[in-house]
Amino acid sequence: MKILGIESSCDETAAAVVEDGRNVLSNVIATSLEEHKLYGGVVPEIASRRHAEAISTVAEQALKDAGCTMDDIDALAVTYAPGLIGALLVGVNFAKGLSLSTNTPLVPVHHIRGHIASNYISNDANPPFLCLIVSGGHSHIVAVKSYTDFEIIGKTRDDAAGEALDKAGRTMGLEYPGGVSIDRISPQGDENAYQFPKPKVTGSPYDFSFSGLKTSVINTIHNANQKGEKINIPDLAASFQKSVVECLINNLEAVALERKYKNIVIAGGVSANSKLRAEAEKMCKKHGFNLFLPQLKYCGDNAAMIASQGYFEFLDGKTADESLNAYATMPIDSLSF
């Protein structure tokens, strides 16, 4: 079964063809990242315009690379939530038009479910498993009970880990995206040079909070500037990255031990972070857990992961008609369409 996936939730316009949820036949991405670097972050209006300009060409190229036409496609999967609403609408409306014109079933896909599926196209992960999802907009610990059944165990109360890394990187004067720049420069620094507070969250013991960490690193820089002191940026980057990763791994470890999970999966854009991957491997080796990580090329936003998850949603009977809308926010465990 071949699924054509469409992804446009942020600044990547992507299309891919995936067979039987696992075999990637094509994966095409057009990004407007370089343009957003001029502004230090994604500008929603610019992203939407670039999606509108690129989406037809990207979809056509994905079919061509896969050696397919729409006659070979069994279903059309599209990211419809969550994300930048203008960006999402470009992909959803394109997919609806293509679905109607070719009489191809339309499958709505939750973006974060798609990130989890990046492991299905990268390795032999199969539910049930415990998944840490870390990206610019999301930080979740999710029990993946089946390909379409999810339980949120922990989540961020404020900033996502990726957002905190990006904003900290920008304050340090590093190139956008800040999280990538922090990861790149951290090996040159001493991760114990600066001490940051350990966030405490009341209520759920497995929730995250990163706004305090972000504020702390910003205050460290501002205070040094006011005193005329020089900041060692590699040291600061390494220390901040260590603090963020410790928060993520400590909660993940606690949930895995309490709920007796042996299979651990990490997904999302920040799953490419070298420190996070190293600490996850160390933690899993310590407890004898099996660790599954997406290939680096599938960590960021892409349509192959959407097509993969779309396959399993389609098998579960989740299809939509021309009334499908896009949503800026939506829990991973509660879909609406």
Image (cartoon, helix red, strand yellow):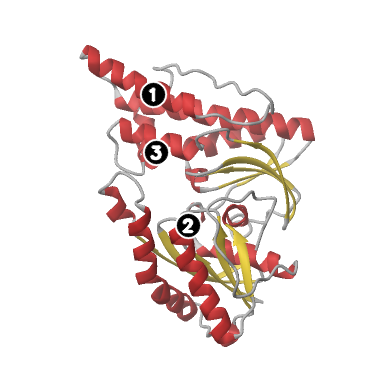
- At mark 3, the secondary structure is helix
Q: Nearer the viewer, mark 2 or mark 1?
A: 2
Residue kind at label 2, given as amino acid type? Ile
Whichever of labels 2 and 3 marks the residue nearer the N terminus, that label is: 2
Q: Which mark is residue 85?
A: 2
Residue marked by disc 3: 166
Residue marked by disc 1: 217
Location of residue 207 in the rendering, given as x and y in whole percent from the top left corner:
63, 31
* Residue visible at 64% across and 62% down in the picture: 309
**Is residue 129 something that shows in the picture?**
yes
Residue kind at label 1, given as amino acid type? Val
Quarter-wise, where is residue 235 in the image? top left
Mark 3: few/some/many CA within 10 Å (<14, 14-19, 20+): many
**Is residue 229 something that shows in the picture?**
no
Location of residue 4 in the rendering, given as x and y in whole percent from the top left corner:
56, 73
- At mark 1, the secondary structure is helix
